[in-house]
Image (spheres, helix red, strand yellow):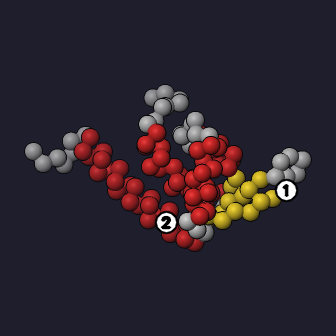
Amino acid sequence: MSDDPKWPSDWIRAVLAPCILQQVQTRNESYGYQIVQDLGARGLPGIGGGTVYPVLNRLEADGRVRSEWREGHGGPGRKFYTITPQGETWLSETSGAWQEFTARVAAILTMEGNPA
């Protein structure tokens, strides 16, 4: 497999919100550029801030994260995001549903358990 796979954009859209929320939860708090770097390091390279920030805004509007602006020390300020209890619940439910969904799709694609 390539180091930089070109996943279909609809696949990325389907998983980006829970992946971003997982990164915020893992670090306890995070900012956009750090999330971009973390996603790349975890196997989703090529996702930029122009893709991540609208998702963060939507997660905040939905009450799944909250943000806090902090002045930078020797650099620009940053908006830090933390997961909310509502976000934790949504992430847990979404992760479980995604695991079940991908298992079913994998079974279909490999013809496992296919009624014939």
Mark 2 crowd level (few <14, some 14–19, many ≥20, 10 Å Cα):
some
Q: In this view, does 14 lie to the left or right of 86?
A: left
Instruction: Give the residue at mark 2.
Output: 90
Looking at the image, can residue 27 be seen? Answer: yes
Percent coordinates x, y for residue 75 in the rendering: 86, 46
Q: Nearer the viewer, residue 25 or 59?
A: 59
Element marked by disc 2: helix
Which of 4/62 is in front? 62
Read off the residue under disc 1: 71
Q: Where is residue 93 in the image (x, y as percent from the top left)?
A: 44, 65
Quadrant of the snapshot with the C terminus: top left
Residue at position x 12%, y 48% in the image: 115
Q: Is residue 67 left or right of residue 7?
A: right
Q: Which residue is drawn at 88% across and 51% down?
A: 73
Amino acid type of the residue that numbered disc 1 sits on in the rendered structure: Glu
- Disc 1 crowd rating (10 Å Cα; few below 14, some 14-19, many 20+) is few
Give, as a three-letter code, the residue at label 2.
Trp
